[in-house]
Image (spheres, grey):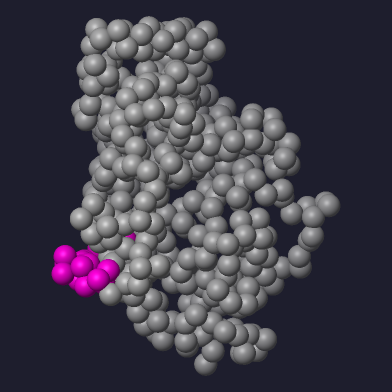
Amino acid sequence: MKKSSLIVSATLLTAALLPAMSDDNTNYIDEVVWVVGDEAILRSDIEVMRLQGEQEGVDWGGNPDCRIPEQIAVQKLFINQAAIDSIEVTEAEIAQGVEQQINAWIQMIGSKEKLEEYRKQSIAEMKNELHDEFKNRELSQRMRRQIVENVTVTPSEVRNYFRNLPEDSIPIVPQTVEVQIVTIQPRIPIEDINKVKEDLRDYTERVQSGRTSFATLARLYSEDPGSARQGGEMDYVGRAMLDPSFAQVAFNLTDPKKISKVVESEFGFHIIQLIDKRGDKIKVRHILRKPRVSQEAINETMARLDSITADINAGKFPFDEAATYISDDKDTKNNRGIMSNPTEDGKRTSRFEMKDLPTEVARAIAPLAVGEISKPFTMINSRGKTVCAIAKLRNRTEMHKATITEDFQVMSNIVLEKARDKKIKDWVQDKIKNTYVRIPAEYKDCDFEYEGWIR
């Protein structure tokens, strides 16, 4: 059984794969149950989270009727503080994250059609539904990271903690792997790219001739799931938070009646319309279109990777050089193809647990011996594009009981996490004392994790 975390942490994956609550599912009469600050917690919020927990086997650490609304309330404390501290999640980040999640679900369930049939929603409806959930999760996580960013532990604290641990309490270090990867993006025919550009120019002409509005076309045609439902509108954002090519064009716009030329970014092709400028931030609408990769192009790229693998195995050049000079993956090519895993403290490590690797990469390297190269496979990269790849298992460390000499960093992370948990719990407890809370009498005997909810 999994232990519930401090805040709402049921995965977006489970949420998306749960059938919609309609027809043959239970319908709930919605009502406001809790009020935290100026945020309401609805009965439906609680029931959806309960259903997710049942699917995941979550241990709530107490009575679910009490612990579920409490966890939602704690998340709202983080989100409210994030707004006060001007912590932002851009529409581009939301769009990218939602796109990655949808692609992962499609890979898991088999096809877009199967996912839509199971969920009883279109892909577009799922993306719209997940927009706010993804945004709130990111805001909550960023606020948590800000709270604990200055928490540290010393080597002596780590040694003292584990020196006093009973033998049967020494942690088990799970299997970890180090992976190198080469990715190549299949070539998209120029005529397909030109067709997308022509469509965008047609949208521009339709708006400027007065036949329709930019917002209407964005809702109909934009492939940015985050902003499309808002008529292409993005929040105020600084230059550094945008793709450089997009930012260069967007920040040069001066007339809200004009529409930009077609601009290419890492995500596809855009047209942009200025809404407002405020200091060093800008508010715009945009329409995103992505040329599609053909199966023929994928097949050609897979064949090329087969040839590259054969040359590496024949000793013509090492995998490191292929990653440096052939790979299209900007995140790894300058590091000899070595994939990096972000840690809680904002650093990066080359070690991954299998569950932390992209699904396609984990599947490809699972049967390999150290030093072997996988067969070519396809995946969706972090920018939402279809790429073909080969992966090399660089190292594997088997599951073992932690030792202070070999696993000091693992042990240090455990002690650091405990210190961060305490910092978070102290912060939440203090926020409860200084936040307006209204809870019905039915919760007065609850075994809450935190004190002060009932007043």
Provide residue 250's location: percent of width, then percent of height.
Answer: 31, 35
Residue under the point 30% across and 30% down: 394
Residue shown at 30% from the left, 7% from the top: 314
Residue 349 point in image, percent of width and height: 27, 44
| Count of residue discs | 0
Which residue sits at x=27%, y=27%? 337
Q: Quadrant of residue 303?
A: top left
The relative height of residue 421 versus residue 303 in the rendered view (above or below) is below
- Please state the horizontal and vertical placement of residue 87, each as a whole percent of the image: 33, 59
Please state which of residues 378 and 439 is positioned toward the viewer in this rendering: 378
Q: Find residue 138 and report its image quarter.
A: bottom left
Residue 111 inside the magenta-drawn segment = no
Q: Is residue 335 left or right of residue 364?
A: left
**Is 222 placed left or right of 14 in the picture?**
left
Instruction: Note whether 336 is above or below 174 in the view shown.
Output: above
Q: Quadrant of residue 332?
A: top left
Look at the image and tell me whether residue 396 can be seen. Answer: yes
Magenta residues, as a range? 144-163
- Which residue occupies 39% across, 27% down? 369
Q: Main secondary structure of the magenta part?
A: helix
Pick the residue in front: 310 or 12.
310
Residue 149 belongs to the span the image colors magenta: yes
Inspect this view and state whether residue 69 appears: no
- The residue most toward the front is 167
> Which image quadrant: the N terminus?
bottom right
Image: 371 above or below 74: above
**Image coordinates for residue 137, horizontal then vertical, percent:** 46, 56
What is the residue that sits farthest to the bottom in this orientation? 455
